[in-house]
Amino acid sequence: MFPINTLIFNCTFSASGWILIGNVYQCQSTPIFSGKDVLEDVQGTHLEGNGDADVKALAFNEQNVRKFPQGIENFFPNLIALRCANSGLIEISAEDLKPFSGLRVLWLPYNKLISIDSDLFKYTPRLQVINVAVNKIESVGTEAFAVLDDLSYFSFFYNPCFNGEAVNRAGVLELIANIESNCSHLSVKKIL
């Protein structure tokens, strides 16, 4: 039994393939929640010769996280890929992503996100892949994607304000233009 008010990631560690970045050492986690949003421990057996600092990708899917968990960087400081799919995530902010300046993949489909703040990606300008398909996004902050010069895959399928996907840089630029013209702009800071 786990103490009340804890958040623990129970990891299955492996080398796994990710879009555009190839095989990386990852934690496929089953979070163990008891009312807290701050990660307090990571469990699981690392592959021989690896430790927490070697983990480059974190995946936690089909969980009830609602808010992006805090403290992940205390265990996995070198993440370049994050996946939180089908987990009821309703908000994520620039501050949530700040510890992951080297992030290249952000995979958040099948959640309940409703908006993208204009500064969401200010700490993660190296992103190459974003998937926010099948959310509830209705508004996007002005120039939210302006810092993402390396973005070459972007899935925005099945959101109320726009439906589309791009798989190369030219397509991404066109998709961003469509999103910016179809999704109401946020004039004040709002959380994704």
Image (cartoon, grey):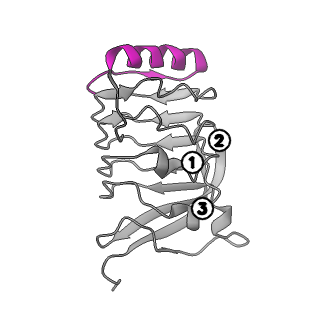
Are discs 2 and 1 less than 8 Å apart at CB?
A: yes
Mark 3, secondary structure of its residue: strand
Q: Which residue is mark 1?
A: 81
Image coordinates for residue 28, horizontal then vertical, percent: 49, 60
Q: Earlier in the sequence, mark 3 or mark 2?
A: 3
Residue highlighted by disc 2: 21
Q: Nearer the viewer, mark 2 or mark 1?
A: 1
Which quadrant holds the N terminus?
A: bottom left
| Residue 25 vertical placement versus 134 (above, below) | below
User: Residues in magenta?
Assistant: 159-183
For residue 146, which quarter of the picture?
top right
Q: Whole-percent x and y of residue 169? A: 60, 20
Give the foreground label among 3 and 1. 1
Say which residue appears at 56% left-offset and 61% top-offset: 73
**Between discs 2 and 1, the one toward the N terminus:** 2
Residue 76 lies in magenta, yes or no? no
Element at badge 2? Answer: loop
Asked if the magenta segment contains residue 162, the reply would be: yes
Residue type highlighted by circle 2: Ile
The residue pinned by badge 3 equals: 14
Q: Quadrant of residue 46?
A: bottom right
Residue at (28% x, 28% y) in the render: 138
Callout 1 amino acid = Ala
Q: Quadrant of the C terminus?
A: top left
The span from disc 3 to disc 2 (Cα, nearest Å) is 15 Å
- Of label 3 and label 1, which has the lower sequence position? 3
* Position above or below: 25 against 124: below
Q: Is residue 148 visible?
A: yes
